[in-house]
Image: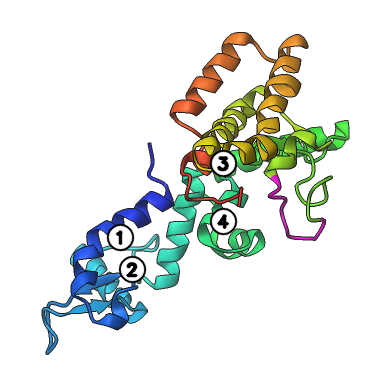
Amino acid sequence: MFPTVGRLIQRVIEITQPLRDEAPAHLRDRLWVYRTTRGADRGSVSALTPQRLGEAAALLAERFDLRDAHGQRLRVTVSMLRQTFVNRINEILDDDLTATAAAAGNSVAVTGINYLKPGEAAEKNWRFMGRALTNELLTSTLGATEKTPVGGCSDVTFGQFAPKVAGAYCMSFLDCLRCRNYVVTGDDLHRLFSFYWRVYRERSRINVVRWRRRYAHVIRLIDRDVIAAGLARRIFKPMQIDQARERARLDPHPYWRDLESFEVFE
């Protein structure tokens, strides 16, 4: 299981807490602090800066003789490290652009254009997308294969509850089950049940009356309008439902794994 961004940051907080305790007052609210090992301030606590990070990255590349794809000495920059970080998050989130943008703290458009780059499976994925797009154009189902953290959506930008602004993706997940653009296939069940358990766990975080008023209907709609209806129409198989529900409970989709990572219910 991959750690979420929230857990990684929490781990950094734990590691640097002793340093922050002895740091100057103006550095005690900083996350990236370290003990200096050279110069007049040797042994004191300092905060990491882009310059120091760049220097450390250059030393690391020199020490291990890191090379780029052209055989040249790798020149590591802060922007390169951030791009690598965002691409890694995107990989962990199964190419979920909306969730990646949220983790990176950028808009979907900025994340997609400035940070993400094709991976090793890009050629294969582009071939698949070409076939899927052709099929959607021929069957008038353009966009039907687009994924969200809850399931499928035929129009994440201009759908029923979407913001209807170019470049802005719909994040109104509590409305998915009432939306005419929402689609659930067998491949979406893990995402759907991860959302199901995430909503269910809200009961332990908020007042019971508030949970019943705001969230209980989500559980009922999933059980009745998606699962029961899908079983009745033989879209899903009982074993498929049971496996997806249990898998989501034990190993939820990364978007819904950490209660603190995405505060979509606030």
Residue at x 54% of width, y 50% of height: 262
Residue range highlighted in magenta? 164-172
Query: Which residue appears farthest toward the bottom when viewing the image?
Result: 40
Q: Is mark 3 in CB contact (under 8 Å) with mark 4?
A: no
The residue under label 1 is 13
Q: Nearer the viewer, mark 3 or mark 4?
A: 3
Specify the quadrant of the image occupied by residue 67: bottom left
Identify the residue under disc 2.
Answer: 31
Is residue 27 in the magenta section?
no
The crowd level at tag 3 (other Cα within 10 Å; few <14, some 14-19, many 20+) is few
Could you give the CA–CA distance between mark 3 and mark 4, rounded to whole angstroms? 27 Å
Question: CB under 8 Å between callouts 1 and 2?
Answer: yes
Secondary structure of the residue carrying numbered label 3: loop
Q: Residue placed at 72% from the left, 23% from the top?
A: 226
Q: Mark 2: which secondary structure? A: loop
Going from N to C along the chain, the mark reached first, 2 or 4, is: 2
Task: Please give the residue where the numbered disc 3 appears in the rendered image.
Answer: 207
- Specify which label sits upstream in the sequence, 4 or 1: 1
Residue with the mark numbered 4? 102
For the residues labelled 2 and 3, the Cα–Cα distance comes to 32 Å
Q: Amino acid at mark 4?
A: Ala
Q: Please, is residue 120 above or below residue 139 in the view?
A: below
